[in-house]
Image: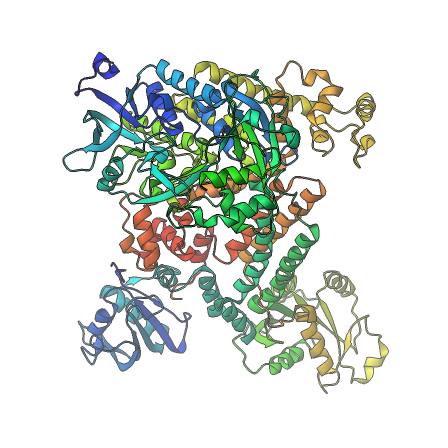
Amino acid sequence: MADHQNPPITALATPWGSSAIAVIRCSGLGAIELVDRIFLPAGKLASAAANSVHHGFLVDPDSRVRLDEVMVVLLRAPGSYTGEDTVEVMCHGSTAGIQRILALLLAIGFRQAEPGEFTLRAFMAGKLDLTRAEAVNEIVSARTAESHEMALQRLSGALEQRINAIKARLVTLLAAVDIQLDYPEEDSGEVVIAPEAVVEVRDKIRELLASYRTGRIYQQGVRVAIAGRTNAGKSSLFNELLRQDRSIVSETAGTTRDYIESTIALAGVPVRLYDTAGFRDSSERVETEGMRRSREILDAADLVLYVIDAGEGVHDSEPAMLQQLRESGRLVGVWNKIDLPAAGAHAAPHGFAAVSLNTGQGLPQLIELICERILPASLTWNGEPVIDSLRQKQLLEAADSALGHVLEGLAMQIPVDAVALDVEEALHSLGAITGEVTTEDVLSAMFAGFCVGK
Amino acid sequence: MTAARRGGDNSGWMDFDVIVVGGGHAGIEAALAVARLDFSVLMITQNLDCIGKLSCNPAIGGLAKGNMVREIDALGGEMGRLIDATMIQFRVLNRSRGPAVQAPRAQADKLAYQTLAKKTLEQQKNLCIFQDTAVDFILDSAGHEIRGIVTERGRRFHAAKVIVTTGTFLNGRIYIGEFSMPAGRLGEPAARGLEQGLSRVGFKLGRLKTGTPARVHRDSLDFSRMEPQFGDQDIVPFSFSYDSVDRPRLPCYITFTNQETHRVLAENMHRSPLYSGRIVGHGARYCPSIEDKVVKFPDRSRHQIFVEPEGLQTAEMYLNGVSTSMPEDVQQRFIHTIAGMEHAWIMRPGYAVEYDYIDPSQLYPSLECKMVRGLYVAGQTIGSSGYEEAAGQGLMAGINAARALQRKEPLILSRAEAYIGVMIDDLVTLGTEEPYRMFTSRAEHRLSLRHDSSDMRLVEIGREVGLVTDRYYQRFVAKRVGVEEIKELLRKRRVAETDVSALRALQLGGNFELDSSLGKTFYQLLKVPEIAMIHLAAVDRSLAEPRPIEWLRQVELDVKYEGYVARQDRQVDRFQRMERMKIPADFDYNALSGISNESREKFKRIRPLSIGQASRISGVRNSDIAILMVSLGRWAKQAG
């Protein structure tokens, strides 16, 4: 048996960049022996048992220089992710250090892994099927607990069960048609496909389709931009929202006149939050550039928190933009500084939330409003399987459309033997989701989507 | 062609390109195909008088089977013309249903059919017929290639290819109650010996069983107690060679079994060889004997019987629906309980026949066996059932034996092209445990496999093979052009006021608002359920004249089902993509560590030619197919 005959490959399994610890995965024929050659204490890995962890040093065999102090996880075929001998090296996460270790691994015989190659090998070793391989990608990129949970559910086959239940209904419809196909009209009664039964199945498909938005929001998150004139209180709102989530993932500082960006979780949804440069009339060049970028961010945002200073009221330049945001359904209006005496002089525009970011007055209501707008109650995850890949969505849409043809055919008095063709089409699409039907497109799409090292 | 090869000299050194063993429906098509492709062929059969016999029911065609007969014709086979010339009743089944499930069926004059079959063989250039029984094969010294056959009388015939079409005769044994004897048909000895030859070649043999009902004398029946069933007035010929045939139209009769019939059968069940355990072979679930029906459907109070004439020159009537292997006294008693048959005189009893068959998964889709080059097997010998199934396989085996001699790639029809393709793919991919009968539901792309479109699907292929004559091909091209012309006329012709009133005069009924059709094209109008081509032709005579009715029907189906055909075509494209992913003959399944052992063993045994075929092997996991695809695809390189 040509088990684990694949040449050894390696790649950084953690994101590229400085961090406390980085993991470099090495897998394939001779992976353990190869790493052993650069590991101190010498010979320890080659003789080590499967599923063991070892402390030691990586050493350049020529110069005898110690590159790093590492922990090594050793897995032997077939009990690893890829089904091959695997060594996972946990080293310090400096980019220079990682580069030196990778260069050394390549020098002693490893090849740089292609995108998705570890998962491809796992797949080829029969370790995971397509839907599960797809889920792996999403677990890896899950950014909140909820999106992680959804992907895990997929990995356990919950979506598959739900789709199989839908398929079973369609198979029953077809079985009745098959009897009619094989017996002449004298011997068997006329089989009819009840439109109600088809509608029922289609509704179930549409339910799942609707879950795509839910899945998408949890998986991909939303972009929220804070906008308004300078000094309206944008930065205060930005900081207030940051305080809502203690597990801030990253923060990129722009120039003070550009924008600030951060990723937070609100209502379990990953939120990419932007504090944009304030709008004001300015001929200063940098300022104009900053405002152009602000515009771009606003255009790309799913939600815009527009802050207006209640003391200043709505500026002449603002109604047009507010109107545009309102029409696109992306506006959350924030009527700030209601605690100031001048606030009473102006009326808040329709739908604006009155708040004082200074005193905290109205803040809980505002947060609640923002959460509701990010994730409407109808899209909140109820624990049922959801779809979150475009591929699944397209296949469900194809099934939905095929059942539409079925209903159309029945209405047009097309004989069931022809209508059955569309029922079969719907079944085919559903089968492609659960991996029962495999096409080239699926395979190429699957393995093109992976990042190196996953 | 030398005199020796022509077979003028019966001495032992004679040499043929191909030998066909058996003169049944598979053998006839195989021998004719080979001879027409200009190779010398010897047909060896046990009894020249039994060539082309309809052993069981006196009918050709039926659901899915009728489609195959027309497919055979489009490829250049003979069955369609044989039945056209000898039919005594014609019907299109399922006229009330959709086009995908309609099929032609004809009652045959049995004797006329077999006489014409034999005459056709006799008149065929390059074809010799010889009465003897093949008992063994001659192989090359390594045992890997066929060289010829040895007969019962010790004759040795050499040939480069041998096609075995022995039907139910291989080690056949018939059963009538407690009585049993070696025989292929009642009164005809079994073929013995060749089963050992097949075993030596490496074939796994199994036992199958089939049966036939009693034949009764027409004059002993009371037709006034039965319901006559007449055929269609319009006969659609099976063959695309001509527009019409003029044949007699005899009625069949319908009657039913009753509770008393079932009681007689139930009381004597212990005397049935099926239930006493004497018959071990598997029968077809779909074509059960009457005793099977009584046991398996105890709730049915009656079963339908079609009483069918066996020919113009005989008084024998066939009792379709009461196939049996009961003892003769029980047969007589239960038949006499049936309305109209109270005094029926049984001329031949029903019987069951059990015979050896070989596992068809040991054949390639070309019907050549995997163990010995040049040895082909077709028909009931590889587990099928039915004349049409046998003929379809025989034709393909004949074509492929000839193509091998021509050093051409074998012709393998896909499941999307022909029922014949579906059948052979099923047999060689899945094997069979019971007599394999063709069914509409076995085909995935039924709408593409309509009987009336057989010529559009297959004539070009038959032409390329070399079996379609010039005249036939010209007719086909004229039809293809003509159908497109009519469609073009329909696209150009717009509905005028006068058309609306003319259509209204036809009183079509339905919910359709005629006024709304004003200004639309006739093409669009034809898509309305209530509107048929004949209505449009009635409004505008120029559409119909001087065109054959079949062309109009073709146009109507094409237009009405346009959307469906387009969607089916997309499914077919998808299907063909998998078929086109070829698996090299020497592919090393051992190198795929991730697939299950069960799948690996099946892949190695079946040796699928494509990913498509591999995916149809039963019990193979989907993920194993995906792994196979990846290992064959461009991703394999990345995997190293």
Task: Tell me what residue is drawn at x 55 percent, y 55 percent.
Answer: A430
Q: Residue furthest bottom?
A: A359
Indicate the quadrant where residue B119 lies: top left
Note whether A294 is above or below B366 in the view shown: below
The quadrant in which the C terminus of chain A is found is bottom left
Looking at this view, name the residue that lies furthest to the left. B141
Is B543 above or below relative to B224?
above
The residue drawn where x is 55% and y is 57% is A392
Quarter in which the N terminus of chain A is drawn: bottom left
| Residue B158, placed above or below residue B577 | above
Which x, y percent locates residue A116? 39, 61
Residue B178 position within the rendered picture, expressed as x and y whole percent measured from the top left? 39, 43
Residue B8 placement, left or right of B419: left
> Quadrant of residue A68 in the image?
bottom left
Residue A95 relative to residue B227: left or right:
left
- Residue B67: tell me if it is visible: no
The answer to whether residue B197 is seen in the rendering is yes
Residue B166, image quadrant: top left
> Camera-side residue: B135 or A447?
B135
Residue nearest the observer in this picture, B637 or B8: B8
At horizontal 57% and vertical 49% (from top left) the residue drawn is A175
Please name whichever residue, B412 or B16, is drawn nearer the observer in this view of the structure: B16
- Pinpoint residue A127: horizontal percent, then vertical percent: 38, 64
Snapshot colouring: rainbow
Q: Is residue B331 left or right of residue A345?
A: left
Count of all numbered marks drawn on residues in the image? 0
Q: Position of residue B185 (x, y in %)?
A: 38, 32
